[in-house]
Image (cartoon, grey):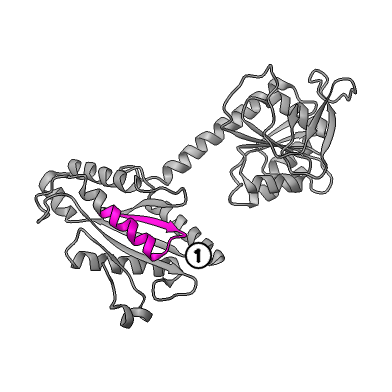
Amino acid sequence: MMVLPSGLPGSEVTLSGDSAAPFARRRGDAVPLIHTGATPTIPAAAPLVVPTLSLLLVDDDPGIVQVLGRMLCGLGHLRFALSGHDALRLARESAPDVVLVDADMPGMSGFEFCALMKADPQLAEVPVIFVSSRGEVETEVAAFAAGAADFIRKPPAAEVVMVRVRTQLRLKAMADALRRAALVDGLTGVANRRRFDEQLQSECERAMRDDEPLSLLMIDVDHFKRYNDRYGHPAGDLCLQQVATAVQGLVRRPADHVARYGGEEFAMLLPQTDLSGATHLAERVVAAVEALCIPHEGSPPRRVVTVSVGVASARRTPDAHHTALSAEALIGAADQALYAAKAAGRCQCQTYRPPIAASDSGGSTG
């Protein structure tokens, strides 16, 4: 049995399961397709693989969806939709790696669906393969003009479908790897400044929309210039790698982000975290780096590598613990707290208190 996880109305559709005659309907060997939201079961003859890729099949004819599903079964996680509207909803819920879509569908055509995919920043890079019974050159040209990555004519041959889908998956994997490399710091392996700026803006918008706190730690290696001068730049690079690993190792939630902000400075972005929670994590950062016991004779009195941390938290409505919610305000507040930590003797964290509460709280606290 093959399951249809499209969330479409209705409970069951009975379709032909004869892959040798792709579009023939025969009552004797019908296979039920059930709209349950589960992963499609793999036929016994197909190799069992761990699904790591996601393919979205879109056609208003359930029989064609089933045939394409049989051709691609085992290649990855298969999802199905019988309309452009439902396909777009599924794609936005979880971006697929490749989409196969019928050019001519009622309501929203494949051309309209593809254009909407390419207009969505989260889906623009997903390759779309048109599958159409219209073989004229004008249709193929229109598909590519809409943003299609490839075009397959009906009735599709299994070998053609498989090789073209594999090609698009390979190309997308290469493009994804290049995009990831562009957002990762080459030395430390954590996110780079560009990625941090993107994440900060996105999380600020999310926190504003959901009225939740957003916290930021600015982390600076103490006396790092002295370290480089004394031990050399290769040792300095290794030091930064060890510090980054220690800081990254404290992250427990997928939503938390660690980035190299610049030079010897790191940032940790903490969505849905108030000042108290952020301060607790900052104290752990200070302790974790000191526990590395990296010798640093130029950093008395401890004579090991340490960090200073500035902590700030923002919310849509500022209060005694939260500054105004914007990227600029949050970075500025965390920077001020970091300066306070440096001035207070380093190897510690300081928290930022908004000016509206300065008279009551006494400013920054360690």
Q: Is residue 213 magenta?
A: no
Residue 268 rendering spot, x and y as whole percentages: 37, 55
Question: Which residue is identified by label 1?
Answer: 212
Q: Disc 1 marks which amino acid?
A: Glu
Q: Quadrant of residue 54?
A: top right
Label 1 SS: loop
Return the residue found at the far right: 27
Q: Which residues are magenta?
A: 265-286
The residue sitting at 67% across, 34% down in the picture is: 39
Residue 48 rendering spot, x and y as whole percentages: 61, 21
Q: Quadrant of residue 267?
A: bottom left
Q: Is residue 279 magenta?
A: yes
Residue 99 rendering spot, x and y as whole percentages: 67, 37
Residue 100 in the image: above or below residue 160: below
Visible in this render: residue 19?
yes
Q: Quadrant of residue 22?
A: top right
Q: 62 and 97: which one is in front?
A: 62
Quadrant, the C terminus: bottom left
Quadrant, the N terminus: top right
* Neighbour tally class for label 1: few under 14, some 14-19, many 20 plus, Cα within 10 Å: some
The residue sitting at 75% across, 33% down in the picture is: 131
Residue 321 in the image: above or below residue 295: below
Residue 360 rendering spot, x and y as whole percentages: 33, 81
Q: Is residue 329 left or right of residue 136?
A: left
